[in-house]
Amino acid sequence: MPSPNKRSRSLRRVYVKTPGGKTTLHYRKRKPKVAHCSKCRAILKGVPRERPYKMVNMPKTAKRPERPYGGKLCSKCMREMFVKKARS
Amino acid sequence: MIEIGRICLKLAGRDAGRDCVIVDILDNNYVLIDGNVRRRKCNVFHLEPKTDVIKIKKGASHEEIKKEFSKLKLDVWDTKKKEKTERPRKIRGKKKADKVEEEKPKKKGAKKNIDAKVVSVTDKEKAKNVPKKKETIKKVAEPKKEIKKGE
């Protein structure tokens, strides 16, 4: 029997293939929620879904799209905003 | 709306939200832009045309556009050229030789000087003492041989 904390579903299960050829069960902490556009709540692309300790080691360019408001707004909302500004 | 000299707002990519000018019309869909963006080909749908139009030639250079933009008090994108910095290159034979010359002579020289002084003092004493010892040894050694010969 696995230990009680491993019997609950608070940890996610990952199948890992060991060097010996066996597939074993590993328990890891769950990933955070997917990033969403703050205006229209659409899922943001190009923003990785990782725990903070992995995000820290990533380069800045890998963490968000490199355009104004990248990682905050989706591209549609950003364009709308600029168009509104230009026409006002 | 899309014509040469029209000032536009760029909507897509990392230059989004910056002003640019149409320099050339390449295609039904594509134009060449310059100004406060990187000079590049751009889709018409990624531009929001503004009211202003500048008088420029078709395919005008970046410096001409700079002058026109300065009149309108708009910023201009300028790529900074990297200045070539000289690398500190290793010269195999020379560097080692220099290091050896710098380090060792000081130590050796210092030691030598000290030794030289010491030696110079001791040598004089030895020079006085040693020959006497040698004489005594010879004197001692000779009789033994004679004894052996005799036997």
Image (spheres, coloured by chain):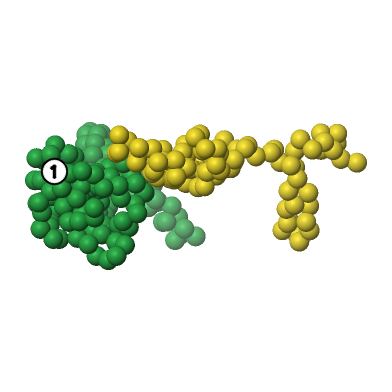
Chain colours: A yellow, B green
Residue in view at x 39 percent, y 50 percent: B141
Q: Is residue A74 left or right of residue B20?
A: right
Residue in view at x 55 percent, y 42 percent: A42
Residue in view at x 22 percent, y 34 percent: B117
- Give residue A72's position: percent from left, percent from top: 47, 36
Q: Which of the 4 image quadrants contains residue B58?
A: bottom left
From the image, tell me which residue sits under label 1: B69
Give above or below for B16 relative to A85. Answer: below
Q: Which of the 4 image quadrants contains residue A76?
A: top left
Along the viewing direction, whichever of A63 and B68 lies nearer the viewer = B68
At label 1, the amino acid type is Phe
Q: Is residue B112 visible?
A: no
Element type at mark 1 = helix
Outermost residue on the front side: it is B1
Residue in view at x 76 percent, y 61 percent: A21
Q: Is residue A27 visible?
A: yes
Along the viewing direction, whichever of A86 and B95 lies nearer the viewer = A86
- Give residue B88's position: percent from left, percent from top: 24, 50
Which chain hosts label 1?
Answer: B
Outermost residue on the right side: it is A1
Q: Is residue A85 left or right of residue B151?
A: left
Along the viewing direction, whichever of B61 and A17 lies nearer the viewer = B61
- Give residue B114's position: percent from left, percent from top: 24, 34
Give above or below for B58 relative to B103. Answer: below
- Give residue B140's position: percent from left, percent from top: 39, 47
